[in-house]
Image (cartoon, helix red, strand yellow):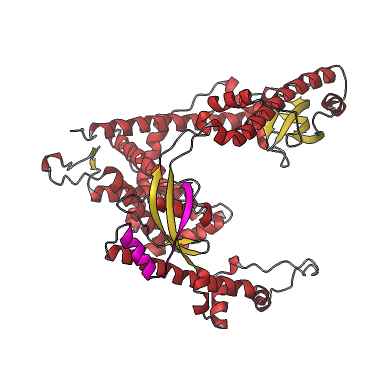
Amino acid sequence: MISWIQRTFQHHFRTIFAVLLGLLIISFVVTYAPSSGIGRAENRVLTRPFFDLNLASQEDQTRLAGDAALSVNLQAGYMGLESDQLQQYALQRYAALHMADQLHVPAPTSDELAGMVKTLRAFAGDDGQFDAKRYATFRDSLKTNPRLTEADVSRVLSDDWRASRVEQLLGGPGYVLPADIKTQLVQADSTWTVAVATADYTGFAPSIKPTDADLAKFFEENAFRYEIPPRVSATYVDFPVTAYAAQINVTDADVKAYYDANPARFPKPADPKAATPAKDEKPDPAADFAAVRPQVLTALKFERAQRLAVKAASDLAYALFDGKVTSGPALDALLAGGKLVRKPLAPFTREAGPAELGGSPQIADAAFKLDRDRFYSDALTSPTGAVVLFWQDTLPSRKPLFAEMREKVSADYIENEKRRLFVELGKSLRTQIEARVKAGEVFDKAVAAVAGSTVKVETKSLPAFTLRQPPQDIDYSVLGPLERLEKGQVSEMVIAQDKGTFLYVIDKKLPDLAESSPAYIAARTQLASSISRFNSDSYLQDLVAQELKKSEPVAQ
């Protein structure tokens, strides 16, 4: 994947950079552009100082955003930050450069810059090492790139080098205590031999028979769960695909072209009777197409018929707009003239669209934009064609009566009680299992003895592992309690994926904690580096916030 990204970045750098630069500039404009000040010239913000930049200036925005985007692309080999992260990086990077100017940090020498280039992911080969050919190709691409020159790249790299020196000064050596290093080594590199007991939650079936008083109390205590959100009451005119299917004619060439354009939608069905193909057997595109041709034909006809349905629905919406039709007799007359009939929809919420139209979120969203003044929608696609909605009313949220929700309340109460009883059972089982194990009983026998017929429990032993390299066949979340366990102890039950899991530590071997060990030295270096980066980032974030606050617009 990394290699593909690098190759794509290399071959299409000009296009990628142009698109990213455009998006970045837009985000900066939205965040920092001055208000238009229409009608009140005295409120117009002409500048937004940020050190020696003006964030209200498109030229400065372009420079700030473009340099940051290029910096990330060169260092990571691809755009590794989201838009808001990249914006923050651009501001912090410029703050670091401002400090570099104040501290008179010199520009890198030619040798230092060349050494930096060899560490950039943008110029790394498939083996992760510097690829001179990739670097040469990149430089050649700059000769025909009107948006980016070699001087731009050299300037950005030089700025990155100077900013990194400031960050090193701000971060310091990253002091870390020996106790913290040993704690990390113990957590990550201790070797665990563990037995696992898994209780099946789905098969756990306690007898729960709530009274009406229990349900009423639960309903009142959890009223927020049952509040009915706002709903829309509407009707619709349907334009089904079936009404236009007869108008669709397609040729064999149309079907083949549609298949070629959408091969992933029509995978060849597996033949359970067919022999396993040989490794060197070549695929047969003609046979693959023949096997799915009926599905392709149906999909193509549906798509074209739906286009006609959408057009017919659009014609209705336009006729309503062009004729300035209001609800009532004028609407009824227009629909009658086109032999169109409105059908009712049961009131629906924004989160769950009308069931009659497949619960479409697009249709639900459009419905909640309608009101008394704008009472009809544009043409909307539906699972069976297209529709136009007609608003009738928007029903406010309300708290339902207990009688209306009794069935759901009962199901929720029973599930809630089942979960509570399962947790209580887990506490009881853990106490009994640990007591039996300490008395010398084998773990799986202790589990079987205390579980009985109450709940189905399965046990197994895991090969020795470390948390740095956990076993692949277990949910990592259940390993969390290990950090608090010692040899011979049983964990609390951890519930995940409808199972309750206990861990029994058969053995625990600590790693080499000597300060001269390679693992200790590596952990110390890693922690120190992390703390240093944290210190530097924290300082630069505060510096950016303080600088932006100086020019915050004052509310009038």
- The answer to whether 179 appears left or right of 199 in the picture is left
Indicate the position of residue 14 as horizontal and vertical percent values.
39, 61
Q: Nearer the viewer, residue 114 or 397?
A: 397
- The answer to whether 366 appears left or right of 435 in the picture is left
- The answer to whether 305 appears left or right of 266 in the picture is left
Indicate the position of residue 547 as horizontal and vertical percent values.
27, 33
When asked about the image quadrant of residue 335, the answer is bottom left
> Which residue is located at x 63 percent, y 75 percent?
293
> Which residue is located at x 36 percent, y 62 percent?
332
Q: Nearer the viewer, residue 404 or 47?
A: 404
Q: Nearer the viewer, residue 475 or 373?
A: 373
Query: Can the viewer see residue 410?
Result: yes
Confirm whether the magenta stretch covers residue 68. no
Q: Quadrant of the N terminus?
A: bottom right
Q: Nearer the viewer, residue 158 or 331?
A: 331
Looking at the rendered structure, the number of numbered marks drawn on it comes to: 0
Q: Quadrant of the C terminus?
A: top left
> Which residue is located at x 54 percent, y 59 percent?
4
> Which residue is located at x 81 percent, y 68 percent?
273
Q: Determine the residue located farthest toward the front in the rendered image.
A: 329
Q: Which residues are magenta?
A: 327-349
